[in-house]
Image (cartoon, helix red, strand yellow):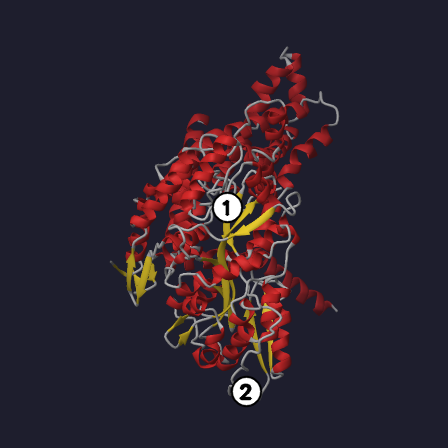
Amino acid sequence: MEKDSKRMTLDRRQFMQAAGAGLAATAVAGLPFAAVAQDKVELLLWAWTPDTQVQADMFTKKYPNISVKVENVGQGGPHYVKLRNAIQAGTGLPDLAQMEFNSIPSFKQLGVLADLGAAANPVKDQFIDWTWKAVSDGDKVYGIPWDSGPMGLLYRNDVFEKNKIEIPGTWDAYSEASLKLATDAPGTYMSNFGVSDAGWVAAVLWQAGWRPFHTEGTDIQIKLNDDIAKKWAGYWQKLIDAKAVDTKPMWTTEWFAALDDGVHASWVTAAWAPVLMQNSMKKSVGLWRAAPMPQWTAGGTVTSNWGGSTFAAMTTTPHPEEAALFATFMGSDPEAAALWNSKQFLFPVLKSLIDDKALMGAPNAFYGGQAVNEVFVVSENQVDPSFEFAPFQDFVNQTMQDEMSASIAGTGTLADAFDRLQDKVVAYATDQGYTVS
Amino acid sequence: MPDAVATRRRGRVYVTKSVAPYLFLLPFMALFIAFLIAPLCYAFGLSLFKTTMVAGTQFVGAANYLKVFTDPSFWDGVVLLFKFGLMQIPIMLGLALLYALILDSGRVYGRNFFRIAFFIPYAVPSVIAALLWGYLYGPSFGPFGQLAEFFHLPKPQFLLDGTILGSIANIAVWEFMGYNLIIYFAALQAIPQDLEEASSVDGATGLQYALRIKLPLIMPTVIVTIIFSIIGTLQLFSEPYLMRNLAPGIINSHYTPNFYAYTLAFTNQQYNYSAAVSFVLGGVVAVVSYVFMLLANRRAA
């Protein structure tokens, strides 16, 4: 069973990190005719999203002199470990690599991400604004987005109806529903507090206004334990103390089963989750629905993002122009982008696809015929673009997971976990030579 | 023809006497240097520097080592492994010894079957073993949890703060008991048969023969297995690494020193410090093994 949970974790990884696009009804402006080599060029791309070679071959069809070989060196963590080892060794880097949004600052800091601006800037207006902001710095572009994960709420219609719970529009209502469900239906939880995945924590806090990092060169502001974090910690601590929220480790078989069995009545999650759920659940077909992410103020329209990926070119590539052209193609070519959505089931980053009513409005039987993507389309346009990840996000995620999980297991409160996190991250950043303020 | 013989003989004498052993050792030495000594030297070199994101690489001498000596994340892991070893090694070796003596007593049918049955877990890769036990320990999925639910008993919690070390120790016992059993069994088989006849002539019971004669005779083997177990314990990595998914609140990223070294290198990008941690761990292993040998020898003497 544990093996299963591994597999599911990988599935979710796959979903988290890829791009999507629809049957591009809207014409997308052609790629710039860059000065492409007349000789044959072969590019190497490290990516783990399944069938990436299909899109790469579409590129070669259009630019016959450039062939692209896709290698899967591992999903998520192992992929980055191999990249870092190649950087450390000074040899063995591919020409391009899949790069999640939250990894871009780290690799940019290592100086290995090439500026794709010349090829990419002409198509920047086609991308959802926040995705472009996450990969660019002025005219410099460090990765081409092709997959995103705007947040929403998936919930069990059957459990909500049976216990007379309204769809919570605000976090206050969500808290009340959690307490009500704990009283009315012991053993059933409104949600699982998933601190074993730091990506989830960051996404939910992102919406609350948490901005833990701001980096300028070697100066970094770190405020992981600010008032917003403390307020958020207090919100969940109350529910944990009241036993009104479950605290299972995420991505385990037990956790998937809890969603499928109706033990967890809802999950605040990203746009890649609906397909993941559909592929992992057997019993709850037709019982799920999607709703907007709960808001901190009534009538608010702020959401955030969890996951999503880009293609980045390495500064070490001997073919920077071809690499930039390829990365741009992969994100913005109408046919390739459409395939990300229809073949790999990823959530789009192109405005033309987000606005494609036929594509995003397709009803889904797993969700009782609801067009779930429409909910996430609204969310995609509400993602607050001002969030910054740290240039050492892996360390932050690891420490966050350690400290918050320790709090759940009984070591102090969640608020204490944020204090410990702040201390450890400041110590690390200082040790790495940053000027911390 | 005679010339040829003479040449061959001369050649043979020359090679055999002085060069031959080294020629035979050459492949081993080449691999030993390429894959052990050279990486160790490289790692030691790494541990004397400090590479940071902002300031680049600097020579820091022993600074990384000094930091290890005051790093609670490292020493907490070492203390944990001492607890783990004090619990797990006696149980594992005690059981292995007991079963080896029973199998060797000649009173058990299907001796070969049991020998293989005990040994099979050792042949299971530790990754698979951890996954398997992870399933068995699962509170709502695992058979123990389901059984408890069926009888309306409280579910056993194998993955909580107080129990998880025992749960991991149980996996290690399951994995390595058979391996040690085979070693003991082989040592017991080497004891000459006439000792048993002599002892029974002197009126010793089977139990007395096992405890007073066989056990002392295989004591050197027992000591070797204890040292192997100490080394194995201090290098514990894959079981906690794989169980982390199930109990992330208890198994943190520096749960055991080896796990800590892994996290430092591959998550935190602190290769230099990670190398220093690895060397200090190597030192701890050497010291503990040596102290145990000293104690064992003193008792024997």
Chain under numbered label 2: A
The image shows residue A50 at horizontal and vertical percentages of 62, 62
> What is the residue that sits farthest to the top in this orientation?
B203
Residue labelled with disc 2: A37
Which amino acid is tagged 1?
Ile
Residue A189 vertical position relative to residue A75 in the rendered view, above or below: above
Query: Viewer-proximal residue, B202 or B238?
Result: B238
Residue labelled with disc 1: A167
The image shows residue B161 at horizontal and vertical percentages of 44, 33
- When asked about the image quadrant of residue B75, the answer is top left
Q: Earlier in the sequence, mark 2 or mark 1?
A: 2
Q: Residue at (60%, 25%) from the top-left corner?
A: B148
Q: Secondary structure at mark 2?
A: loop
Query: Viewer-proximal residue, A411 or B271?
Result: A411
Query: Viewer-proximal residue, A283 or A415?
Result: A283
Observer able to see residue B50: yes
Q: Residues within 10 Å of mark 1 (few under 14, many from 20)?
A: some
Chain under numbered label 1: A
Observer able to see residue B286: no
Query: Viewer-proximal residue, B182 or A304?
Result: A304
Q: Residues within 10 Å of mark 2 (few under 14, many from 20)?
A: few
Spatial CA distance of label 2 from label 1 is 56 Å
Which amino acid is tagged 2?
Ala
The image shows residue B286 at horizontal and vertical percentages of 42, 42
